[in-house]
């Protein structure tokens, strides 16, 4: 048994090395320009220093937190120049409402060839949240680039959208559970409540489930007309769930090699064209009908609406713990354009962006892109 575990650990480390170039915890602070932290002209205000209450578990030195600390709540997000403003707001919202903010550990997955380097992005996070516990993992885009097929929107073909498939390989082996969040969310409740949900039986993923949605529309006629392919759902009742908010059991994920199961469907897609969207359908093919259904309050999604028509979405009925601007429209773009949707004002209090150093005008392209068009094309 000891030899088996050793070989398993060695194989895991080999796979991890192939998926990410390195793991970095970015120390230090950048220059303070007087009205906010600056990095290459980009300015964010420093967030308040949120601290634990007396009821929170006490662990070792908070300045040198290990990701293996059993008292931690693990949150994984992607980190890129296009969505950096949203990511900063999301982190701020988590800390602001957490009962034990010092026990939240963030895992940021950054693209190898982003317009801003992973180190620059990490330094900006550090300067905005000086006491935050986090790591930046550099995702190798060639890991998945040959598996990605064309989608209905070019933004959905971004390799970083698929980083969630590799969390079990990228994160430290001691991290056995993680909450994955998209960059266009704000959390308005205690993240510890989401962390503490039970994944019953053989459930690998917990997420809000929507069984009233027309599930057939997520796959093409080629898929539904093929009895071999479509029978994947024959033993379960598949329902739609949004992959932008998930609680993931990484131990079972690794043991079941679910990364490879998702890749298998992506390979079929390359040959047969069985869906039109990006990274969502492979997750549905593997997990739909077999997830832990979490209360809908944890993903009030679709708030991005349709920016082409300028439509705005309202909240689903019921309480709200997490707001999700999935869709084409992003709140920071609409707010800067003076055409916000009503719910965009709920995102605004978490926005720490102070503008780009161009005469005080907020530049929602974050100063890294020559065009703002790609920012308006969001994750599904």
Image: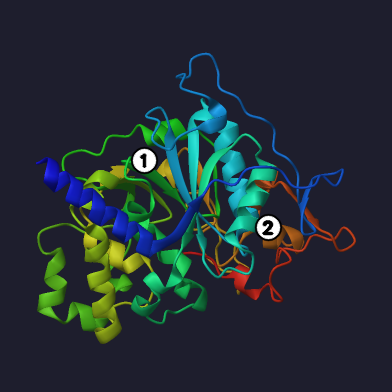
According to the picture, the residue beneath numbered tag 2 turns out to be 332
**Residue at 34%, 47% in the rendered image:** 207
Q: Secondary structure at mark 2?
A: helix
The first of marks 1 and 2 along the sequence is 1
**Residue at 32%, 34% in the rendered image:** 197
Using residue 215 as the reference point, say whether residue 228 is left or right of it: left
> Where is residue 333 shown, x and y percent of the image?
68, 62
Q: Nearer the viewer, mark 1 or mark 2?
A: 2
> Where is residue 251 shown, x and y percent of the image?
25, 44
Classify mark 2: residues with Cα within 10 Å, few (<14), some (14-19) or many (20+): many
Using residue 370 as the reference point, say whether residue 322 is left or right of it: left
Image vertical order of residue 149 relative to residue 286, above or below: below
**Protein image colouring:** rainbow
Classify mark 1: residues with Cα within 10 Å, few (<14), some (14-19) or many (20+): some
According to the picture, the residue beneath numbered tag 1 turns out to be 295
Q: Is residue 339 visible?
A: yes
As rendered, which of 94 and 207 lies closer to the eye? 94
> Where is residue 365 shown, x and y percent of the image?
70, 67
Image vertical order of residue 289 relative to residue 264, above or below: above
Image vertical order of residue 256 relative to residue 104, above or below: below
Image vertical order of residue 277 relative to residue 103, above or below: below
Using residue 41 as the reference point, say whether residue 148 is left or right of it: left
Q: Is residue 278 visible?
A: no
Question: Residue reaching furthest top?
Answer: 54
Q: Secondary structure at mark 1?
A: loop
Q: CA distance from mark 1 to mark 2?
A: 27 Å
> Where is residue 1 shown, x and y percent of the image?
9, 41
- Dividing the picture into quarters, in which one does residue 346 lie? top right
């Amino acid at each position: 048994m000891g030899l088996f575990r050793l070989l398993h650990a060695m194989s895991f480390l080999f796979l991890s090395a192939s998926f990410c170039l390195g793991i970095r915890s970015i120390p230090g602070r950048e220059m303070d320009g007087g009205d906010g932290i600056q990095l290459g002209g980009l300015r964010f205000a420093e967030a308040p220093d949120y601290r634990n209450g007396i009821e929170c578990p006490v662990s070792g030195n908070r300045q040198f937190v290990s990701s293996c600390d059993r008292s931690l709540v693990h949150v994984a997000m992607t980190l890129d120049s296009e969505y950096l403003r949203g990511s900063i707001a999301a982190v701020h919202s988590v800390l602001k409402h957490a009962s034990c903010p010092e026990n939240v550990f963030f895992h940021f997955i950054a693209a190898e060839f982003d317009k801003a380097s992973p180190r620059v992005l990490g330094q900006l996070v550090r300067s905005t949240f000086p006491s935050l516990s986090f790591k930046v993992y550099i995702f190798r885009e060639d890991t998945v680039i040959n598996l990605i097929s064309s989608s209905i929107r070019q933004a959905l073909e971004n390799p970083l959208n698929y980083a969630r498939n590799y969390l079990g390989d990228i994160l430290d082996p001691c991290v056995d559970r993680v909450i994955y969040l998209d960059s266009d969310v704000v959390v308005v409740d205690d993240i510890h409540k989401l962390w503490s949900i039970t994944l019953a039986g053989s459930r690998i993923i917990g997420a809000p489930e929507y069984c009233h949605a027309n599930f057939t529309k997520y796959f093409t006629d080629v898929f539904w007309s093929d009895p071999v392919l479509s029978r994947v759902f024959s033993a379960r009742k598949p329902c739609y769930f949004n992959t932008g908010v998930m609680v993931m059991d990484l131990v079972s994920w690794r043991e079941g090699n679910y990364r490879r199961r998702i890749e298998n469907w992506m390979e079929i897609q390359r040959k047969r064209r069985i869906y039109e969207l990006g990274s969502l359908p492979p997750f549905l093919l593997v997990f739909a009908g077999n997830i832990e259904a979490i209360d809908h309050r944890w993903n009030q999604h679709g708030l991005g609406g349709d920016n082409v028509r300028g439509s705005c979405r309202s909240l689903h009925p019921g309480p709200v713990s997490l707001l999700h601007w999935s869709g084409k429209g992003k709140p920071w773009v609409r707010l800067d354009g003076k055409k916000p949707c009503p719910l965009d004002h709920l995102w605004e209090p978490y926005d720490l962006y102070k503008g780009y150093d161009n005469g005080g005008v907020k530049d929602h392209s974050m100063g890294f892109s020559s065009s703002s068009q790609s920012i308006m094309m969001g994750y599904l």
